[in-house]
Image (cartoon, rainbow, N blue to C red):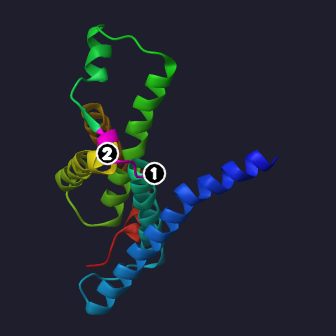
Amino acid sequence: MSDFIGTALEYLAERILPILVGTAAFWLVRRLLLRQGTVTEGGRAHEIGVLVFALYVSAVLSLTYLPLLPMSAGGFSFNSTVWGLLTGTYTAGSWVYTMLAANVVMFLPLGFLTRLLWRQRPWQTLALCLAATLCIELFQPLAGRSFDIDDILLNFLGGALGLLLAEGFRKLWPKAADALRANA
């Protein structure tokens, strides 16, 4: 039982606390920008959506950068597992497919939320998804993590699928989509 409690506390320290701190920092900066008039406040649904977005961004950053490792532990991988699987030159166990799917699912909320919460064109949402995954991957070796070309491809695919889901949401529930949208 004490091993379980120790593991749970370690997990909380590694993931939950940074997520909450990141969300609080995001929210404080947002409040400051609201006071300055740089951004406009939306309705209740929009503000809840922005809070969910802040939690999501903090969780992604926590997942992709923590725990920080020595820089020498990271590296660059330009060998594509996805390409190897498609061409049949690479075979993998189920854990590889799970990791590939997780990289797609991880960026679904980015495409979905940004398209619904802010007034941007679809190409802007896709550009944001590409820029976000590139930034994450390019800076991961500095945190002792690995740059992986597959992560870029799969994260971008997830963002694009999230965008498509947002478009469907907007068509099926236009009033709810309008409530989520920022004013201005």
How far across and down, in percent of the image, does residue 76 sit? 24, 34
| SS type, badge 2 | helix
Q: Amino acid at mark 2?
A: Gly
How far across and down, in percent of the image, does residue 128 sit? 22, 54
Tell me which segment is drawn in magenta: 67-74
Q: Taking 61 as reference, is 11 left or right?
A: right
Q: Amino acid at mark 1?
A: Pro
Q: Where does the C terminus fall, quadrant-wise?
A: bottom left
Q: Is residue 70 magenta?
A: yes
Q: Which mark is residue 136?
A: none
CB under 8 Å between callouts 1 and 2?
no
Nearest the viewer among 128 and 150 is 150
Pointer 1: what residue? 67
How far across and down, in percent of the image, does residue 168 sit? 37, 47
Nearest the viewer among 115 and 79 is 79
* Residue that sits furthest to the top in the current view: 88
Give the mark, 1 or 2, whose residue is nearer the N terminus: 1
Residue at point 23% right, 84% down?
A: 38
Nearest the viewer among 180 and 47 is 47
Give the crowd class for mark 1: few <14, some 14-19, many >=20 residues within 10 Å.
Answer: few
Residue at point 38% right, 37% down?
A: 104
How far across and down, in percent of the image, does residue 130 sit? 21, 47
Give above or below for 95 relative to 149: above
Q: Which mark is residue 159?
A: 2
- Image quadrant assignment for residue 47: bottom left
Nearest the viewer among 6 and 125 is 6
Give above or below for 32 relative to 134: below
